[in-house]
Structure formats: structure tokens, C-alpha cells
Amino acid sequence: MIDLSIIIVNRNGRHYLPDCLGAIYRGTHQASFEIILVDNGSTDSSVELVKDQFPAVRIIRNRTNLGFCKANNQGLAVYQGRFALLLNTDTVIGDGAFDRLLQFMERSPKAGACGPKLRNADGTTQHQGGVFARKFWLSPVPVKVDYVIGACLLVRREVVDIVGGLDENFFFSNDDLDWGRRIRQAGWDIYFIPEAEVLHYGGFTINKFDRRIFVEGFRGGLYFCRKHYGWPIYQLYRWLLALSMVLSALLVIIPAFIPAYREKLIAFLQIFWIAVTGDLLPHYRTKKTVLLVSNGHAEDLAAAAIGTGLRSEYEVKALPLVGLGKAYDRAGIPQLGLKQLLPSGGFAKEGLRYLWRDIFAGLLLLTARQISRLRRAAKNADLVVAVGDAYLVALCGLFARRPLLFVDGPKSVKIAGYYPLELWLMRRYCRQIVVQDQETADYLRQQGLPAHYLGSWVMDYLPVTGAQFALPADATVIGLLPGTREEAYANLGLCLSLLARLYELDQKVTGLLASTLDRSKFNYPGWELQGDRLVNRSGAAALIAEGKFADVCLRSKLIIGLAGIANEQAVAFGTPVVSFPGSGAQTTLRRWQEIQKITGRSMEILTGDEEEKVRQIDELLHNESRLAAMAALGKASKPQWGGVPRIAELAVRELNAGG
């Protein structure tokens, strides 16, 4: 992995780009880096200049000016580095500046972000704070601060994963303050690093009065105040601002026959109207907008796949309600989620003890904040696509109030029928309903609901790469699916223990672990992490295969699965699965029994102690006819793949029907 991903948002910066980019290549000696230029509809041939003079720069080109935050998030959606660095076009870095920032971050694990000393064109130190801020920018040594200016801002990848990108409700200004506050709220520190220096010409894009940027700056200030200082302070500020705009407008009414003053008069009146009406969202929509809402890991994956099929023609945003929403990050879909992990991992409905743990961990406050974000995001949405359960229908129906396409992830009449409340919610709020099997679609249609079975979508985001993992041809490969939530670490320990016992019976047994878990948290007695392998002192080993779930399924003879819907996916590839109650809400006996109603006996539920489980697995491994029967049942459980593009087509029809 490279060290640094430098993201530069450009808007008619042709005059500055040669110095900006040239200084990076000349002045960065130790850090490996990539440069991502996001162009916001430039008309000055700056993109052509970069292609000609700096061919290694990766370019993302927007047809219009989508704003600083949205453009930076486009870069943050695709960057490859351990750190991301946001950089303005009107900057020239000092020799070794990025190397020094990187060195500080590497020796300061609690530092989530940092910024350099900014200098003006005349060499003086640039002011980096508000009117009443302490003058940290004059400090000769690194100092902890509340935020650093987004003209040059280095952020750790883990911070981006947890906190998310810039809030796109800021078009221009205040976004760096907001990001800094969210980074600190997540438990990270922010530092000013004076030994790294960057020349910042500052404001070259607005030295000529730009009404849109001027107005959006005040809109951003109002939004920041409401978001972080509470309703009373926001009300006081908005009405003071409205009064000041009236006075400002009166001062320029007489000279308004001059074009420059006319533009200012219009700007003052627009800001007055924003303050009075509370219209705080930026107005730069160029496409119809789809809002994806999901509440689970598998649901995120499905929604991200649907969004990927829509994003070429529509603006797509996501609000994951459970977990970190990494599927959206990987797909490059901007997300509005708060990225907070709760103890149940989204399975609070599995019992009161999980619900209470979530409540004590902040579930009620988190839900209130999610509702607030949903309401704001839905104002600009032409269609909401909700992937999950009836809870999402209630949430989107009550608070989004936009056309709703509901993809019912977990429900099937093969498991249990629908409650009257669920049927009422779908009848009241859903424009279209997509379910996971034909039996369920038929049942809902009998109830007068617009339900469709469009094929299995849970298999569409699992690419097959053809990897064979360099395993011996005669190896007895046991796939391990421990899950993705926090309890997966404990479940992996259970899987490894069984693998070691199976190896004692057959030296050809080898494990193949499908996992995106944090390897630094692996701590299993008798096992040692050696590169991409977990090795037991007995000789047993498990190869770690990240991002190759489908290949793990296809290469395995049998899978030990403690991973919820991943078990359904594994058997659909024709690989038998064994499961047993593990750690966490999604690995209960009840959960396995529900899945078994969909997969049939292609998934066996093991019983007894560890020795009994090993005996059952070993017996199954030597029963070829039983394995073949399980494989056939598994493939039959998901008979029609390709649901995602059909769901996307249904969404397009709804968008077009909406005019």
C-alpha cells in the first residue's frame, strides 16, 4: 500500500497547477504517493494541461461544479494510500513537507489528522483561526488543535473509515471545522506541524466576487451552527444574520446600477432568505437523486451494488444505519451514516439482552441523529431505495416521505409469515417491494401489495476471480467464515480450534479463511500469524484470503460458517456448510434454523461438544454422496441470480415515472 493519496480539487486552476504539482514531485522524497485530481467543471483547459505535463495524475472529471466537499469525497472514495491528504490548487509545498507530516503521524498513533504551517506569498505566517482563536499557527513546535485548514490537511485512513468524508451539506467553507470536530468526537487528536511548510496563495478562486460561493459560505456557516451548537444558538445566529443582511442590502441599493454592487445586493438578499427560511442545503443538483438506506452488512453490500448500477445516470447517496458502511466506501458511493458500532451488530431483535446493550451504548441518540439525517437527505431525493426489514419501511415512510422502493432482505414466508403491522407499513409507504423468493412474492401479491421476485441479489456482489491460492491439488480444504462483526474474532477462535483437531485426523486438511478482519486483533493460543497465514504449532494452517469470498467457497470442500447470510451464499455456490451456535446475536441456534428453512439441509447444524463436532465434520468429509446432495440443495436454494440489475431497472422505471 502506498503512503499518501493526495487529493486536489480543481476549478479553473490552470495558472496554479504546474507549480502545485511540480512542487509535490520535487519536494516529496521518502513517501510513496499518488495524486488524484478532481476537476469541478473547469473551462480553462487545466485538465488538458495536467494530462500533458503530469500524465501519472489520476483525473476525475465532473461536468459541473459540485462543490469542494463533494469533489473531495469523490477522491476519498477511490484513494489507495495509508493516509489521504487534501490539498488546494493554490499551494506550493516546501521541500520535504509531506515527508515531515507523514513522519509525525507514524510516530503519533493517536493523531487522526494534521496540517502544516501555511505561509502567505510574502513569506509571512498565514492566520489559521477565528477572531478569538489562540494563535497556534505561530507555535514553533507541534501543538494539538481543534482543526486545521483544509488547504492542506492530512488524515489517517482509519479516521476516514470511521468518521467518513466531508459533509456534503457544506458547499464551500466550514467543512474543515466540521470534519475536525467529528474527528475529535471519534477520539482522535489533530495537530499543527510547524516544521512542514506550505505556501498558500489563499482565495485565488474568490478574489473576484463570486455570488454563489459567497452565498454558500454563509449557508455553510448557518448549517455548522445548527449542527454543532444547538437550536437556541442557531436561532439567535440566523436572525442576527438576517438583520445584518438587511442592513448590508440597504448600503448597496443606491450603487446597485454598477454590476459588481448588483451582484452583492442579490447575494445579501439570498442570504437573508436562507436565514429566514432555514434553507440550509446547497443547491447544486444536476441529476435526479437516489438515496440508499440499509441496516446490515449484507444489506449494505446489496444496496451498494444497486447504487453502482444507477450512479452513471443518477446522483446516489447512502445512509447505512448499522456498522461502518464500508461497502459504500469501496463502491465510491458517498454516505451520510454516523458510523457507530453497537453491541448487537444490528441484531437487537434477537433478544432483550441485545436490545438493552444497544440502548446503553447510545441506540436512542443514534436513532434520533439518523432520523435527522434521513429527513435532510430525503429533501433532495427523487427515490429512496431501502434494503433491510420493515423497520426501514417505517423509518423512511415516516421521515423521508419520498417514493420508496423496498428490498426486503431477511423476510421469507419459508421462515415465517408477516405480522399485520408489517403488511400495513408496506401497503402504506411502499411504491414497489422486492423479495428474495417467488413464494414470498406470491403471498404479498395475494395481500394486494406490489411485490416482485427479480432473482437472487445476494449473489451479485460476489465476484469470482479464479484464485486457486496455490494449495496442493490433494488438499482437503476447509473454508472458514467467522463473520464480519466484532464477535467474529471469538467465532474465528472456535473455527480454528476445530481446524486444528481436524488436522490431527488428516494431515491434508488446510484452512481457507475468507476474512476482512483486523489482523492485529488475532490472538489465539497455539496460533501465530505468519504473513497471510495463521499457523498452529501442530502444523495446521489457515490461509487468509481477503476480498475473495466466492473463490474461497468454490475452492473449499466444506465450510465452517458462522457468518449469517454468508452461509446462504456459500451453499448457493454448491459448497456444503456446517454451523453451530457461536458468539453474538447472529450465530444463535434460532438463526441457523431460520437459514436452514431457506437452504434446506445444504447447511448442517452441529451439536455436542468440540469433540462431537469434529467427529461429525470428519464423518461428513468422508461421505461423498451426502456432500453431493448438500451441494445440489444449496445451488437450488438460489436458482436465479442477477437480481441487482433487475432491481436497478425497477428503480429507473420509478424515477422516470416520477417525471
Image: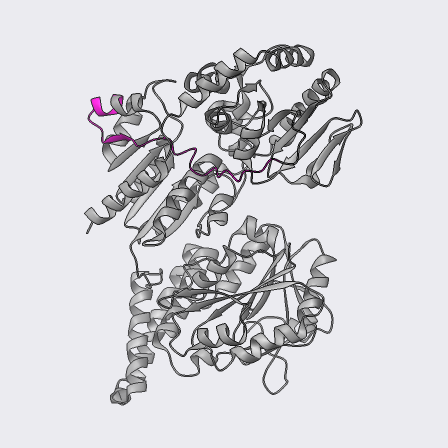
Identify which residue is drawn at 34% across, 76% down: 211
Identify which residue is drawn at 26% across, 84% down: 253
Residue 123 vs residue 221, the one in the foreground = 123
> Residue furthest toward the front?
473
Residue 179 vs residue 641, the one in the foreground = 641
* In this view, 653 is above or below 213: above
Number of labels in the image equals: 0
Here the colouring is one colour
* In this view, 278 is above or below 425: below
Q: On the image, which quarter does residue 151 sit in?
A: bottom right
Q: On the image, which quarter does residue 418 sit in?
A: top left
Identify which residue is drawn at 42% across, 62% down: 170
* In this view, 657 is above or below 12: above
Residue 612 vs residue 477, the one in the foreground = 477
Q: Position of residue 655 (x, y in %)?
A: 25, 48
Taking the image as drawn, is residue 594 in sight?
Answer: no
Read off the magenta span.
Answer: 443-468
The quarter in which the N terminus is drawn is bottom right
Q: Is residue 505 left or right of residue 295?
A: right
Magenta: main secondary structure: loop
Q: Position of residue 179 (x, y in %)?
A: 53, 59
Taking the image as drawn, is residue 489 in sight?
Answer: yes
Q: Position of residue 377 (x, y in %)?
A: 36, 51
Q: On the image, which quarter does residue 452 sit in?
A: top left
* In this view, 551 is above or below 164: above
Q: Is residue 293 left or right of residue 502?
A: left
Q: Position of residue 112 (x, y in %)?
A: 63, 56
Q: Is residue 406 left or right of residue 519?
A: left
- Magenta span contains residue 164: no
